[in-house]
Amino acid sequence: MARNTRAKKQAEAPKVDIGAEIFASLEELEKLKGIPVDYMVERLKQALTNAYRKDREDHRDVPADNVVVNLSKEGLSMHLIKTAVEEVEDTALEIPIDAARNYDPNVQVGDAVNIPVDIQKFGRIAAQTAKQVVIQGIREAERGVAYESYSNKAQELLTGTVLRIDPTSGDMFVRVGQGSDASDAILRAGEQIPGEKHKEGDLIRVYVLEVNKAHRGPLVHVSRTHPNLVRRLFELETPEIAEGQVEVRNIAREAGSRSKMAVRATMEGVDPVGACVGPRGGRVGAVVEELGGEKIDIVVWSEDPCEYVRSALSPADVISVSLIPGQKACRVVVPDDQLSLAIGKEGQNARLAARLTGYKIDIKPASQAEEDSIDN
């Protein structure tokens, strides 16, 4: 406690009257780039500390913790902290008691002594060091701000410009965002819609899978094949979804070919399928166009598994659906002339319906179902 009391009585380091100017610049930087003033103040203190320690050979042995920088709107000052001793063994940390009393007449052996530093005597090398540290601090802060900005956009829809396409891997690099908020995203070949062709300069919509920190800023991974891309596109086109009147319950997708989307109304009097289709099919048409012609079936979700499966097999007509006891599976009977439609090309309709509902679906034509019933 006595040591702190004496420290207050010691002479203050000479201030350089640039504090207000520095803070005005930092406040402007915060407005332009979103870098907090407090963060940059700490970086400046670090820069000045490093500059002082590199300014002269004998300063390099001074620990960084023993160099104190005070920066405020009132001014800028610096001092060293050394311990008063009878006999000096370490010049970086200690000062003879007689010399210490030049700064504080009341100092005693073992007390900490604040030794003012004249910042204006820093050399060109020190100033350059400080500048480089500040520049690095700005870059790091910009990357941090950019990462925070894009980490909040995970699972969202973004519009980007194709920058280049790797001819070897097929990976596509996309610039998303605008101005200072712009960042590069990578659309892997496996996340691109099969058969879709793009060239440099094309505008495309992408779904943000995840955002990782990287040396040069956020690394944004995006997709064109994820089922939620369909969800986000319908949210843009359908006001009833954005307002919560219609809920997208599930999506099963084979990108570039076909998707099935189950929806339900959260309010009476709302037609969930009609809302998504839109007047004259305009809403679903806009999504299909964005996805390069991918077919989209919009069906009604139901709490009743049998009704849900019946709906999911659309556009095929279904005679009956019965659950198989003890299994998450069901038997479906369809008219003979609807069998190929229910199964779909290469089994796609049945496969997507099973993924949409979560039920294994065994489809039989009515004629075979009757034969099985007679045999039993």
Image (cartoon, helix red, strand yellow):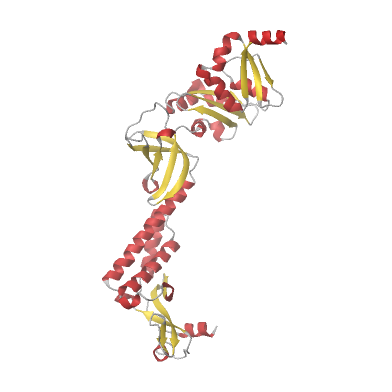
Q: Pick whichever, 143 or 367, lies toward us.
A: 367
Provide residue 98's location: percent of width, then percent of height. 40, 92
Q: From what the image shows, is residue 261 above or below residue 223?
A: above
Name the side, left or right, on which 285 lies relative to 360: left
**In percent of the image, x 62 and y 21: which residue is there?**
361
233 left or right, relative to 245: left
Rendered residue at 49%/43% (across/down):
154
Placement of 320 over or under 354, stated as above or below: above
Instruction: Determine if residue 298 is in view.
Output: no
Q: Quadrant of residue 276?
A: top right
Q: Residue 130, located in which quarter of the rendered image?
A: bottom left
Rendered view: 261 above or below 163: above
Q: Where is the C terminus found, in terms of image quarters?
A: top right
Residue located at (37% from left, 62% from top): 25
Q: How many marks?
A: 0
| 365, 231: nearer the viewer | 365
Residue furthest toward the front? Answer: 375
Q: Position of residue 326 (x, y in %)?
A: 71, 27
Viewer can see residue 92:
yes
Q: Is 96 or 106 nearer to us in this picture?
A: 96
Task: Name above or below for residue 129 compared with residue 108.
Answer: above
Identify the residue at the far left of this view: 124
- Quadrant occupied by the N terminus: bottom right
Horizontal and vertical percent position of residue 250: 58, 31
User: Closer to the camera, 71 or 372?
Assistant: 372
